[in-house]
Image (cartoon, grey):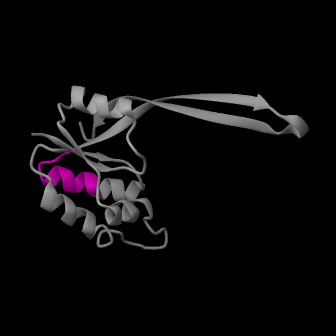
């Protein structure tokens, strides 16, 4: 049974869940425990090397993921790179979510502009292929 593990700073939308089931043939979606979610969402900007900081994330995946499972990895660029590298070395399949984006601009009083951004999941894409 294939699982999608999340290293992602947002909750998955229903569309993302359905697409994971249909396009990746995922049966389970696994959110990280709260301490891992907090760590992933708060990568300190002042640390020169974050490899050791990410150790709990690697430990969680080593304990729970199996070869062939997927990992949705999006977030801090350096952390994303390190975890994609980890996934590939451990026969896990790293993916990211692609989105269609639209912008609505509205002129306000006093020369201000209100900008709204809308994002919609399109597909999962494999890293490195």
Q: Main secondary structure of the magenta part?
A: helix
Which residue corresponds to the image point at 43% horizontal and 73% vertical from the top-left?
A: 47
Q: How many marks?
A: 0
Q: Is residue 83 above or below residue 25?
A: below
Q: Specify the quadrant that holds the N terminus.
A: top left
Question: Viewer-proximal residue, 73 or 85?
Answer: 73
Q: Position of residue 14 (x, y in %)?
A: 37, 32
Quadrant position of residue 36: bottom left
Q: Specify the quadrant that holds the C terminus.
A: top left
Which residue corresponds to the image point at 36% horizontal and 37% vertical from the top-left?
A: 97
Q: Position of residue 105 (x, y in %)?
A: 71, 30
Relative side of 12 to 19, left or right: right
Q: Position of residue 79 (x, y in %)?
A: 35, 59
Relative side of 116 to 83, left or right: right
Relative side of 80 to 84, left or right: right
Which residue corresponds to the image point at 39% horizontal and 33% vertical from the top-left?
A: 98
Which residue range is magenta in the image?
A: 83-93
Q: Is residue 83 above or below residue 105?
A: below
Quadrant position of residue 122: top left
Quadrant position of residue 17: top left
Decide whether residue 42 is among the magenta residues. no
Q: Position of residue 67 (x, y in %)?
A: 9, 48
Which residue corresponds to the image point at 36% horizontal and 71% vertical from the top-left?
A: 49
Q: Is residue 103 above or below residue 83?
A: above
């Amino acid at each position: 049974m294939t699982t999608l593990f999340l290293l992602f700073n947002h909750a998955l939308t229903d569309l993302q869940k359905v697409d994971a089931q249909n396009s990746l043939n995922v049966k389970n979606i696994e959110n990280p425990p709260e301490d891992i979610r907090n760590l992933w969402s708060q990568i300190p900007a002042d640390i020169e090397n974050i490899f050791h900081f990410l150790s709990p994330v690697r430990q969680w995946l080593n304990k729970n993921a199996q070869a062939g499972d997927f990992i949705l990895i999006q977030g801090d660029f350096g952390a994303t790179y390190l975890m994609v590298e980890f996934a590939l070395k451990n026969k896990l399949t790293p993916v990211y979510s692609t989105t269609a984006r639209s912008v609505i601009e509205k002129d306000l009083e006093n020369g201000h502009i209100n900008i709204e951004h809308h994002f919609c999941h399109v597909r999962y894409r494999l890293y490195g292929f």
